[in-house]
Amino acid sequence: MSTLHIQNLHVEIEGKEILKGVDLTVSSGEIHALMGPNGNGKSTLLAAIMGHPKYTVTQGSIHFDDKDVLAMPVNERAKLGLFLGMQYPMEISGVTNSDFLKAALNSRRTTPIPLFTFIRTLEKAVDSLQMKSDLAHRYVNEGFSGGEKKRNEILQMILLEPKIAMLDEIDSGLDVDAMKIVASAINEQALKMQTGLIIVSHYERFYQLIQPTHVHVILDGRIVLSGKSDLVNRIDTEGYDWIAQQYGVQIIKEVKTRPVTVTTLGTCAVKERGME
């Protein structure tokens, strides 16, 4: 069993404190829903775990199977078994999906994956996500629709088989049918590999498809309430105001900014092999 343990985590960006003491433990086979209004720290938490350079950890610790995550560069965190499915997947012009994914896989192996094994694994994953057959020959996310980009993130997760996968609004941009396909692939992978999941979503429908074992609400940079899956239903019905009032915290209003690009496990592998 693998365990991600976060204790008293404080994080700031450009001198502004976003996370103000987060405690969270996620183990293999668990599905943790991370909820809260935009601008209250959900994406910041995931970016800090993965090691985005714009986010500065000022206090606290992150350990994964007793290893100090904060002491590791991003690529080492990825090799350790952490994965982030991005809210805003970036395009990598000139690098095909097949080269990108193969480089990511090989970065975690002592010997390169045999070509036939890689092709067979990739084709099976593409079929499970009902993606277009020409995917392997296209540049990473270039010309992809929003939904295709999100499926491509899950494709990476399936091939890389992380121990802990963090999915940041992976359901946004998906229609109802695509959401069911993506949720089915996530559930299958989580069951097969006993992957621990941290999922950020605003939609009860997505959490109906992927039933969380734990639900956490972040307000003003802190996890103020944790519960079971029924907490999702109450939030969907009543919103967050009752939580803010009950626990005496402020709901931070989101300030619209440009999306922050987060480095994925696959991107780390590509950089490591000189394929930017």
Image (spheres, grey):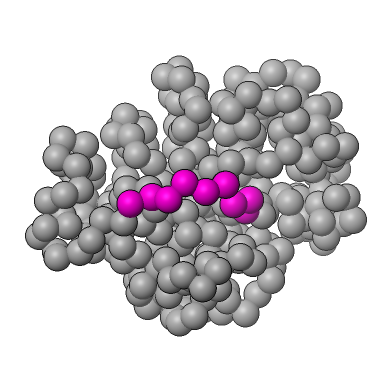
Residue 23 vertical position relative to residue 112 in the rendered view, above or below: below
Which of these two is toward me, 193 or 236? 236
Tag count in the figure?
A: 0
Residue 203: say if magenta: no
The picture places residue 170, in percent across and down from the top left corner, at 50, 38
The picture places residue 92, in percent across and down from the top left corner, at 78, 40
- Majority secondary structure of magenta residues: loop
Residue 246 shows in the view:
yes
- Residue 94, by quadrant, is top right
Which of these two is toward me, 183 or 117? 183
Residue 258: say if magenta: yes
Highlighted magenta segment, given as a residue range: 253-262
The picture places residue 268, in percent across and down from the top left corner, at 74, 57
* Left or right of residue 169: residue 105: right
* Left or right of residue 224: residue 104: right
- Residue 145, by quadrant, is top right
